[in-house]
Image (cartoon, grey):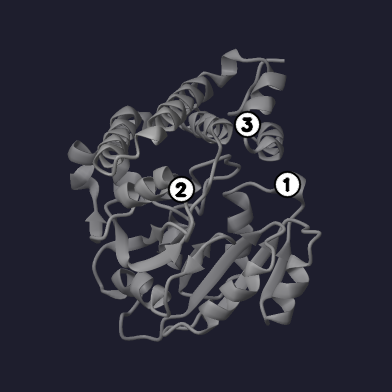
Amino acid sequence: MLINSKAVCRVSVIIPTLNAGPDLKELFKRLQQQSLPPYEIIVIDSCSDDGTAELAREAGVQVLYVLRSEFDHGGTRNRAAQQAKGDILMFMTQDAMPYNEKLIEELTRPLIAGDKAVYAYARQLPRPGANELERLARQHNYPAESKMKSYEDLDELGLKTFFCSNVCSAIRREVFEAMGSFQEPVIFNEDLFMAAKCILNGYRVAYCADAAVFHSHDYSVAEQFKRYFDNGISMRCNTWITPYSAVGKAGSNLVKLQLKELHVTRQWQLIPLLVAESAAKLLGYKLGMNYRLLPAFITRRLSMHRLILTHIEKQSPGITMRQ
């Protein structure tokens, strides 16, 4: 049963946290000042030691706990979703900040419009002070125009059809449950896999450019390598999605955009960094795709999420590493 667009929309906001820091207070404030306020905010905290849980409780937020050794991107969010009471589940990360008071209203708009859109994700704007390459990456992945993606886009977009981000996303609860919740355990891409299941089952995924958050990273070249290594592991453990893969093409399009912009703006000094980052991403991804050929201690050393990888290895027979 789909949500009646005329009914009151109850939105449960779910935020996994780990030592979120003082910015979390501002995040709660901006969420509570939304034109469509959340029905509830649920924090699921990985035993922070900086007062994150206490700050959340002071803000009137429901707090759940998970051991750091048991955290994984899919299972932890699923645990919080099981406690949520909303018709729509909205997932955020602790480092995403609403751009304005219309975030929830705009993000949920396509989900209550009565068509086949069931999963939506927000535009990500670079934080003030973000480096130029990160700014261009956000511009490429999160353009100013909204888009509705469906099965018909696979021939043109390939894997990009399934692109979605739980940095800030929303999904109809009944569809979330019908799709079996997020995959778990999973080291990466729980949002992409959910979007793929929705699209392959005839639903649509909405990119909402009018729903925006500030979110960006300043990863080093080594961190980019580790991130894409984990991405490769994730894709290798989900071979059902590889027929739609076009990672190389998507990556090359981004690099071309960055090169062009650096040339136009005469920021030629950043080209060596761009080359190094691009090489690190490609090498990390390729190694991750072949992680089963690597000794276990090397795989853990190369991963950005060592604890998650160890947890997944214990919980899932699909992850096997050479000893």
Residue 103, quarter of the rendered image = bottom left
Q: Residue at x 33, y 79 (%)?
A: 4
Residue 102, by quadrant, is bottom left
Q: Nearer the viewer, mark 1 or mark 3?
A: 3
The residue positioned 52% from the left and 77% from the top of the image is 31
**Residue 170 at what x, y percent from top left?**
43, 65
Using a 10 Å C-alpha cutoff, classify the residue at mark 1 as few (fewer than 14 neighbours), some (14 to 19) or many (20 or more): some
Task: Name which residue lies at 68% across and 82% down.
Answer: 60
Q: Which residue is mark 3?
A: 303
Question: Residue flagged by tag 3: what amino acid is it?
Answer: Ser
Q: Quadrant of residue 46?
A: bottom right
Do we see residue 297 in this rendering? yes
- Mark earlier in primary sequence (1, 3): 1
| Element under disc 2 | loop
Q: Secondary structure at mark 1?
A: helix
The label shown at residue 70 is 1
SS state under label 3 = loop
Closer to the camera in the image, 29 or 237: 29
* Badge nearest the viewer, 3 or 2: 2
User: Can you give x and y, in whole percent of width and height, for residue 45 in the image?
Assistant: 71, 61
- The quarter of the picture where the C terminus appears is top right
